[in-house]
């Protein structure tokens, strides 16, 4: 922020404000030039103090200091009504400006996120906004949390990247003492690497139904295609997304499901991934277990860089490769990476775009993603 914009607001302290005969202390904001209070923050601070949520002056100050930054750098700088800001815009401000440009630490970034979330919770409770905000989900998705908790986040995420040759080697060590288990485990690893599937999604009750897969394969074959889209559901609220089954996975699926001897004892209306006894697998760690066993079977994976690699590293790799595909084919990553990854916010996808750009020296993309000037909204879309 320019110097003249960095002190638009001034933090003040209210001591011994009496309500119902009880004194309360809280912090609030005023416009530095006019002295006029920022009424929304005053109302939030007073209510929080009375309710006991921020019941000490120090706790009120710590929250209001974060709101001061938010209002100065995003709301007032862009001359926009705070009620019109979307979750995505707020998260982009936190990630792109506060973290990437200003170098705010992960702990401080989370404190500011908490302050803004608390403020909007209050605003929704008192009918100042029509819909609640959810700023937590942007920090829970993989990648974003790595970013704010690791002192060298790009190094941490880049260390998870598994090259094509490394993956091919890993695939040769897929465990399995029967033909079914071996091919099942190979498919699991391929779905992580080529489709970005999470380990818990492999055995989620609505995913990878054999009948559905057979129908998809048959239709694609009739249309002379070697790929198709498949809807899968995530954990929690079961959010749906479409993954693209590429030719490499298509071929393995086709061979796996066409082998009558392989699947003769299993019914078609069951999930794809079953135990050796033909029973649905209920646990959420199938992918993690297979990856760990494959890694343990070869000394090639005992090096330092493999110590922290897991099945989820395949998903990190998929996202990075997807960013490469967008860059090399002229596609806007915003239209592809969040959709295929199932990210709610662009902020999570942007991490992989940055990592890919750093790995491949894409200066144009880096300059776009890492602005050095004031943080402005792009256009007026909020």
Image (cartoon, grey):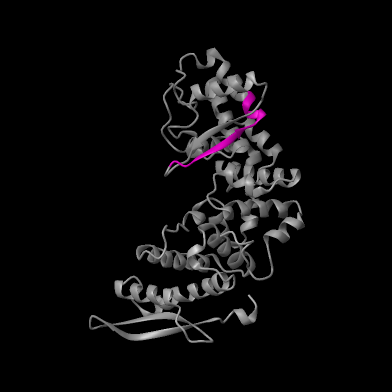
Q: Position of residue 160 (x, y in %)?
A: 62, 48
Task: Identify which residue is drawn at 63% across, 64% down.
Answer: 100
Residue farthest to the left, as pictured = 21
> Is residue 243 at all visible to an observer of this figure?
yes
Q: Is residue 129 left or right of residue 32?
A: left
Q: Is residue 360 shown in magenta?
A: no
The residue closer to the viewer here, 237 or 128, is: 128
x and y percentages locating residue 190 in the rendered image: 60, 33
Q: Residue at x 61, y 19 (%)?
A: 255
Visible residue check, residue 178: no
Please state the horizontal and vertical placement of residue 155, each as a whole percent of the image: 65, 56
Is residue 160 positioned above or below 276 on the image? below
On the image, which quarter does residue 269 sit in?
top left
Q: Nearer the viewer, residue 109 or 306?
A: 109
Q: Nearer the viewer, residue 49 or 149?
A: 49
Work out whether 198 lies above or below 81: above
Q: Is residue 104 above or below residue 203?
A: below
In this view, 54 is above or below 311: below
Residue drawn at (48%, 87%) of the image:
35
Q: Residue at x 36, y 73 (%)?
A: 54
Image position, residue 21 (x, y; %): 23, 83
Residue stretch in magenta: 238-251
Q: Quadrant of residue 197?
A: top right
Image quarter where the C terminus lies is bottom right
Q: Is residue 241 magenta?
A: yes
């Amino acid at each position: 922020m320019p110097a003249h914009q960095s002190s638009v607001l001034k933090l003040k302290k209210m001591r011994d404000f009496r309500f119902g005969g009880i004194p309360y202390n809280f912090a609030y904001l005023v416009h530095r030039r006019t002295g006029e209070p920022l009424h929304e923050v005053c109302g939030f601070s007073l209510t929080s103090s009375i309710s006991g949520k921020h019941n000490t002056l120090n706790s009120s100050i710590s929250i209001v200091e974060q709101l001061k930054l938010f209002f100065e750098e995003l709301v007032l700088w862009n001359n926009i009504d705070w009620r019109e800001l979307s979750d995505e815009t707020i998260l982009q401000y936190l990630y792109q400006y506060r973290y990437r440009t200003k170098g705010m630490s992960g702990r401080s970034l989370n404190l500011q996120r908490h302050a803004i979330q608390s403020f909007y919770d209050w605003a929704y409770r008192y009918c100042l906004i029509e819909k609640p905000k959810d700023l937590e989900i942007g920090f829970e998705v993989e990648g974003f949390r790595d970013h704010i908790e690791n002192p060298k986040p790009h190094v941490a995420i880049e260390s998870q990247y598994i090259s094509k040759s490394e993956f091919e080697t890993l695939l040769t060590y897929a465990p399995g003492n029967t033909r079914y288990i071996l091919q099942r485990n190979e498919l699991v690893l391929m779905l992580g690497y080529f489709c970005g599937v999470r380990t818990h999604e492999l055995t989620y009750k609505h995913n990878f139904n054999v009948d559905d897969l057979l129908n998809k394969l048959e239709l694609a074959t009739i249309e002379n295609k070697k790929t198709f889209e498949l809807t899968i559901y995530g954990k929690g609220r079961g959010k749906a997304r479409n993954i693209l089954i590429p030719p490499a996975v298509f071929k393995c699926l086709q061979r796996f499901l066409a082998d009558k001897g392989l699947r003769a004892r299993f019914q078609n209306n069951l999930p794809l991934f079953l135990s050796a006894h033909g029973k649905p697998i209920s646990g959420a760690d199938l992918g993690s277990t297979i990856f760990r066993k494959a890694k343990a079977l070869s000394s090639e994976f005992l090096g330092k860089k493999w110590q922290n690699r897991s099945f989820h590293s395949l998903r990190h790799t998929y996202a990075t490769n997807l960013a490469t595909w967008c860059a090399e084919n002229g596609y806007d990553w915003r239209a592809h990476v969040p959709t295929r990854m199932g990210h709610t916010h662009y902020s999570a996808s942007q991490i992989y775009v940055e990592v890919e750009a750093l790995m491949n020296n894409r200066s144009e993309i880096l300059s776009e993603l890492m602005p050095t000037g004031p943080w402005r909204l792009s256009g007026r879309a909020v």
